[in-house]
Amino acid sequence: MPTIRQLPPSVVNKIAAGEVIERPASVVKELVENSLDAGSRRVDVTVEQGGTELIRVVDDGCGVAPEQLELALASHATSKIIDADDLFRVATLGFRGEALASIAAVSRLTFRSRPVDAPLATELEVVGGAAEPLRPTGGPCGTTVEVRNLFFNTPVRQKFLRTTQTEMGHLTEALTRLALAHPHVHFTLNHGGRLIHDLPPGDARQRIAALLGQDLADSLISIESAEDDISLQGFVANPTHSRPNNRLQYLFLNGRFIRDRSLQHALGEAYRGLLLTGRFPVCFLHLQMPAAAVDVNVHPTKLEVRFQDGGRVYSQLLGTLRTKFLSTDLIARASSPS
Ligand code: ADP
Ligand code: MG
């Protein structure tokens, strides 16, 4: 008869990391989400070798008090929810208290933080889940997290890493989603000493222009509707800017990028007859609804969500777009040299 044992935290964290941390892009997503939750106005991301050697995220957010640093890196430790009821009113991007512990379990992680009122920063280094003693150090207000040698102690994971170029593609996409959702935050991305993106704070259309080009930004049709407690706003592109795939369909729910087949279907329906087969619409749409109307806790990375009333969201999206298209002369817009 085999003996049953409770797994030690180091193993539990490695297993959890497998769910949340798939590749360098996942680390960037989790770290930048933390920076945004901390109220940062500026977030600088620096990476080496597609993020496999180094990912550094520097923010000017609220920081973490020295006596809380070890807790920040512990699993199931969060400042964002207190009890199970809070799960139904989450207003932050994070709440699982798992990201930092997971990343620290599979990398060499340094967390350096200085709250606004503190004279010094404090640094905590964790190597493969084992924490070194806290160290006072210099540094600006805010938080800097450095993640080196991702998956150095999980060779199987390391084998799944792709070329620098592929990892960079995923990483840039992760940052693009966050930057589109937060146009008022200044973001930079550096890779191997080269500045890939410098996105100064602006409005939603300026952010789209900075990321995807002025031409696309100029063709956007603005969308706005509110029905009961669901509001929808953002942009869809003129049919002439359609794409051969659905990768430029950006849907955000309460500030979080989501993938939702049903809403993608609604989008396709709205454009029916306006696009040739094999062409896909482009959109940047933000849905806001009460946190209680949607469960974001169905997927470890929160990419998929479950709506309480998916049908209502579907018909609001489809109805809003149809009404807009009827009142907009798309053909005239398409041929006007804007
Ligand atoms: P979660 O975001 O789900 O709470 P994390 O493991 O990502 O879990 O972070 C744990 C805690 O560490 C957060 O709840 C927050 O209090 C603190 N923290 C992490 N990153 C930052 C940051 N950049 N600035 C301020 N606090 C942070
Ligand atoms: Mg987090």
Image (spheres, grey):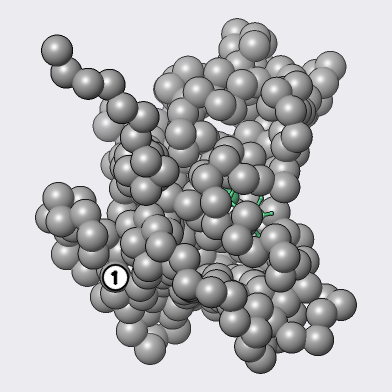
Q: Where's the C terminus, which quadrant?
A: bottom right
Q: Give left or right: position of 89 versus 219.
A: right
Name which quarter of the figure residue 46 lies in.
Answer: bottom left
Q: Where 245 sits versus 42, above or below?
A: above
Which residue extends farthest right?
117
Q: Residue at x 74, y 28 (%)?
A: 83
Q: Where's the N terminus, which quadrant?
A: top left
Q: Which residue is drawn at 65% across and 9% down?
A: 309
- Residue 102: x percent and y percent? 43, 50
Element type at marker 1?
Answer: loop
Q: Which of 283 and 327 is in front in this view?
A: 283
Give neighbour class at mark 1: few <14, some 14-19, many 20+ (Cα, 10 Å): some
Q: Residue at x 47, y 66 (%)?
A: 131
Q: Which of 202 and 127 is in front in this view?
A: 127
Q: Which residue is drawn at 69% across and 82% down?
A: 121
Task: Judge whether residue 289 can be spotted in this image.
Answer: no
Q: Nearer the viewer, residue 274 or 233?
A: 233
Name which quarter of the figure residue 89 lies in.
Answer: top right
Name which quarter of the figure residue 81 lies in.
Answer: top right
Q: Which of 149 and 13 is in front in this view?
A: 13
Amino acid type at image mark 1: Asn
Q: Where 5 sits versus 280, above or below?
A: above
Q: Where 193 sits versus 252, above or below?
A: below
Task: Judge whether residue 155 can be spotted in this image.
Answer: yes
Number of callouts in the render? 1
- Residue 282: x percent and y percent? 47, 42
- Residue 20: x percent and y percent? 40, 43
Q: Give left or right: position of 310 versus 81.
A: left
- Residue 206: x percent and y percent? 65, 64
Return the residue at label 1: 149
Task: Find out if the beta carbon at label 1 lies less than 8 Å from the nearest ligand 1 atom.
Answer: no
